[in-house]
Amino acid sequence: MRKVEELSLKEKLGQLLVFGFPGTAVTEDVIELINEYKAGNIILFAHNLEDLEQTKALSKELRERIYESTGIYPFITIDQEGGVVSRLPEGAAIFPSAMAIRASNNPEYAEKAAYWTGLELRALGMNVDLAPVLDINNNPQNPVIGVRSYGATPEEVSEYGIAATKGYMRAGVMPVAKHFPGHGDTDVDSHIGLPTVDKSEEELLECEFIPFEEAMKNGLPAIMNAHIIYPAIEPEPVPATLSKRIMQDIVRDKLGFEGLIYSDCFQMQAISEHYGTVKSFANAIEAGMDLVLISHHPELSKAALENAEKQVELGALSLDRINESVERVLKFKQDYTGENLDEKYIANPEALELIKEIIRASITRLDNLGDLPKIDKDTLFIGSPANRTTFASSDPSHSNIFPEFMGNEFAAESVVTTVNPDQAEIDSVLDKAKNHKVVVYGTYNAHLNKEQIKLAEALQAAGHDLIVVALRNPYDLQLLSDDVYKIAAFDYTVKAFAALVDVFNGGEASGVLPLL
C-alpha cells in the first residue's frame, strides 16, 4: 500500500472520490477519469450490471485499471441493502428488506443475511456495501426509508443493525451505515428535495444517534451522512454532508468515531440544486468528509477534482484536511480491498434457502379475526404493479404482478389496478367483485397513495370478506377498520408471494410488526 507522502495532490483527491458512470462497459470517459484524474473508487448501480458474469468481469476490469493507474486498489461500492434497494442482477441471492428481517423476530437473520450478501459481493468483485440502514423509521409519511429501516425504536434498529454490521465485517465487506444523523423522521426525499429535521442535539442523542453510536462501539468502520438540514445543531444553512459542526464536532469529537465518513450522492437534488455538485466536493472535504459520491456522470467528477485542486491553491481547501482523510482511506483499504472470493459464493444454494426461510418467518398478521376465509378458485385477487416511490429504490420488475401471480396459483380471477385508482376504476373493480365473497387486495404504499384505501373501503362496504396484504410499508394496514383481515409482507417479490401462498393455504403468519 502506498503512503500519503508518496502521493501527488491529484492522487490524494482521487482517493477521496467515489465515482459512477452510465452504461455497462468501461468507456473512454471512465478511462480518462482513472488515468488522468487518478480517481480511486467506484460505485456500481443496477444500470451498470447486466448479469452475474458481466458484473464480475466489470468489477475485475475496474479494479485492475484503477490499481494500474494509482498503485492502490479501489473501494468498489454498491447499494445492496436487500428488498427495494437491490442493485445486483437477476440470479443473485437478494435478501428481503430490513423491516422484513426485523419482523422475523430473529436478529441472527440480520447477521446471516449480511454475511451471505457480503460473501456474494466479494465473489462478484465488490468490497463496500452502503448498508445497513440505521435510520429509525418514526415518520409514517417518510417517502424514502420505510421498509429499508429495521423499525421505529432505537433499541430494535440498534440490535438488528449491529448484527448486520457484524455479518458484513465477518464476510470481509466494509459496511457503511446510513444516513447519519438520521433520515427516518423526514417527509421529503433528498433525491428530489432538501429535507429539514427540527430536532435539538439532545433529542437526536436520545433517539436518532443511538443506533449509530451503538454500532460505532461495536466496530462500525464507516457511516454515510445525509443531505438533511439540522438547524438546531448547525447554524449555517447547510446539510449534514457539508457541515463541519456535524462531522467534526459531533461525529469525531463527541461520538469519538475514527472510521470513514461517506457522503450520500452529490448528484441528488438536495445538493445539485441548492449547493452545486462540483463545488460541494471540495467544501465537503474541508468540512470533514472522507469520501464523496458523484455517482452518475464522469464529467462532473472531473470538474469536481479540477475545482478541488484550485481550492487548494486558493487556500480554501486545506492540504492537512486532505491528508487526514487520505490517511484514513488508505488505512481501511488495507482491511477491505483484498482479493475476490471464490465464485461458489455467487447465488449460493445455502443463501437462497436462507432467503426463503427469512421471508416465510417475516409474514405478519395484524388482525384478531381468527382463521382467514377460505382462499380458492372463487377468490378475487386485485392489486397494482410495484411502483417506484423513491429514486433510492431500484426500478421494480413488472414481470410478476401480485394479483396475476395469485390468480395463476389458485386458478382464480385477478384484476390489475393502477397504484391510485380513480372512481371509474373503483366502480369497475366493484362490478367484477360482485360474484366473489372473498377478495384479496395487495396494496403498495397505500398510506401514500390513498385511493387504494378508498378502494379497500368500498370493497368492505360491499360486504366482501376482505384480506389486505401490504406489499411494502405496513402503514397501509393502520388505515383500515378492525374487521379487515390484515397481513404485512414487506416486499413485492416472487419469494414473498410464495410465502403468502403458504399462509393463504392455512400456514401460520407469526411475524412481529416493528412499527405498531
Image (tube, rainbow, N blue to C red):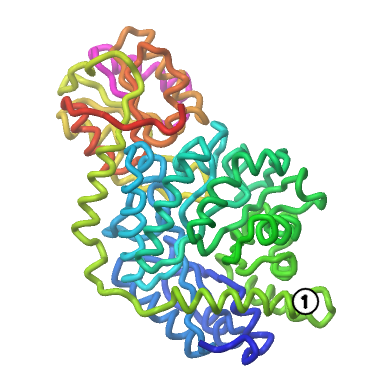
Q: Which residue occupies the foreground of this view, 331 or 14?
A: 331
Amino acid of disc 1: Ser
The residue under the point 48% across, 90% down is 68
The residue under the point 34% across, 22% down is 486
x and y percentages locating residue 203 in the rendered image: 67, 38
> Dot 1 corresponds to which residue?
318
The residue under the point 23% across, 18% down is 372
The boundaries of the magenta stretch are 418-441
Q: Residue 433's quadrant in the figure? A: top left
Q: Is residue 360 left or right of residue 257?
A: left
The residue under the point 31% across, 54% down is 112
Q: Is residue 196 left or right of residue 49?
A: right
Residue at disc 1, secondary structure: loop
Q: Which residue occupies the foreground of this view, 64 or 90?
A: 64
Q: Residue 492's quadrant in the figure? A: top left
Q: Is residue 69 something that shows in the picture?
A: yes
x and y percentages locating residue 489 in the rendered image: 33, 34
x and y percentages locating residue 491 in the rendered image: 36, 40
Residue furthest toward the right? 314
Residue 472 higher or lower than 109, as above or below: above
x and y percentages locating residue 180 in the rendered image: 60, 52
